[in-house]
Each structure stands twice: as C-alpha cells, then as structure tokens.
Amino acid sequence: MRDSIVVVGMGEMGSVFARGFLRTGHPVFPVIRSMDMAAVANEIANPGLVLIAVAEADLHPVLQQVPVVWRDRLVLLQNELLPNDWQQYDLEPTVVSVWFEKKKGMDSKVIIPSPVYGKHASDIAEALVSIDIATHVLQSSKELLFELVLKNVYILTTNIAGLQVGGNVGELWQSHRDVATAVAYEVIVLQQALTGQEFDSAALIDGMVKAFNGDLNHQCMGRSAPARLARALELAEKNGLQLETLKKISVASQA
C-alpha cells in the first residue's frame, strides 16, 4: 500500500485532490472542521503528505496549529498565496497554483495546466493527471513565485474589473481592455511591493490573457470580489502605494 495522505479541509477542492490520491492508490484521511489536527497527528504521524485545502481566510489559523510532525510535508493550494504566507511560520511547503474550477454538482473544469513546485510535486502531479487535470512540475522557487503572482494578477484583475464592468473574461478583454489593463498594472505594482521583487509586466499580462483564452466564459466577479478589492487597497495603504484605478472602482462600487 502506498503512503497515506491527510487532507485538511474537505470542500470542493479538497475532494478533487482526495479523489486523485485515491485513484493513484493512496489511502486518504480527511480532517474536517470539527476534528482536532493534533489528535489526528497522534494517529497518523507519518503521512506521505498533508494537503491543506482550507479556504483562504482559514489558512493562517490552520498553519499556526499544524502539528510539528506534519510541518515538513505540507502542500498548499490557496488563492492569493505569496511566499511570506508560509515563510513567517518557517515552513517550506509544496505549492500548487490551481487553474481548474470545481463547483458543487459539476465536474472539474480546467482553464490551463496547474503548476506545482516542491518535494511533493510529483505526487500532486500524478494525482491530478489521474483524474484528467493538466499540470506541470516547476523547476525552481523563482518559477513558482512568478506563477503565484500570475494567478494573483488574474484573480484580482478579473474580480476587481468585474465590479465595474461585470460579464465574463472574454468580454472583459474584448470590450473593456483599458479597464482590465489599468487594473492589472496596479495589481502588479502591489505584488511587487508585497514580494520585494520586480516582474516582467508584459509576461504577466500575456499569461493572464492565455488564462482568459482557456475559458472565455469564466465570470469575472464572484462573491469574493468586494473583499478582494478591500484587501488589496488595505495592503496598498500599508505599503505606501497609491492605486488610483482600484480606488475609483471601490468608490463607484459602493455608490
């Protein structure tokens, strides 16, 4: 029997990965909200990996409580991830940038291949490929950082621009490219401040458009859009940034 896998958080995303692990012969042990991670760790001290599949808002409380015996085998998949999210806890997790959508009652819908980096990358890739979800393994932490920033640019641009223009990403790029571009460049400025790194803005925009083309009907604005905008503006203020386009959209969306 192959190594056991622990999945913390069994929502839509956790369930997808659990199915992939099962398909590749790994026993899967779920940790749901009502369970104590420490108690589970006493029973399963040496899993092959521990996938943290909780929602973004729950990530930091979970990382603060991860049992010591699990700390060197974590995998993260949340949106809006950046290295400081795990470095502040002195962790070196495997990270997958998820580019497929999973909603209740629907099968997974791939937008573009999901990149993954870290010591458990091959296990993650194997599990996803087994359930027909395209992926590719990255070769360096530098590549991972670019991919995480790219995902953030995509999510924040579509959500925030969507507050102004609505619609889907195909319509956004076809009919409101000026809005999308203005938002994207400000998001890139924010990402650079948060990471202390400079990025090729043109490459990020090109990557964003490639993702648009992967699912032109993907809706721009989900329920999280107002919170994402508020969080982006809060982070901008903390970093001394003036993001005028984002401010204007925030004011207009609250009018």
Image (cartoon, rainbow, N blue to C red):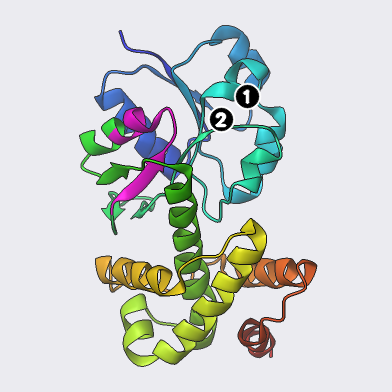
Give SS at disc 1: loop
With respect to residue 166, does 6 lie above or below? Answer: above
Q: Which residue is depicted at the point 65% across and 47% down? A: 84
- Magenta-colored stretch includes residue 118: yes
Is any part of residue 59 visible from this angle? no
With respect to residue 27, does 51 lie above or below? Answer: below
Q: Which residue is depicted at the point 50% across and 81% down? A: 161
Image quadrant occupied by the C terminus? bottom right
Highlighted range, magenta:
113-125
Label 1 with label 2: CB-CB less than 8 Å: yes
Q: CA distance from mark 1 to mark 2?
A: 6 Å
11 horizontally vs 69: left or right: left
Q: Which residue is mark 1?
A: 35
203 horizontally vs 215: left or right: right
Q: Type of residue at label 1?
A: Met
Is any part of residue 75 visible from this angle? yes
Q: From the top left corner, tell me how far across and down residue 193 is, in percent.
A: 66, 65
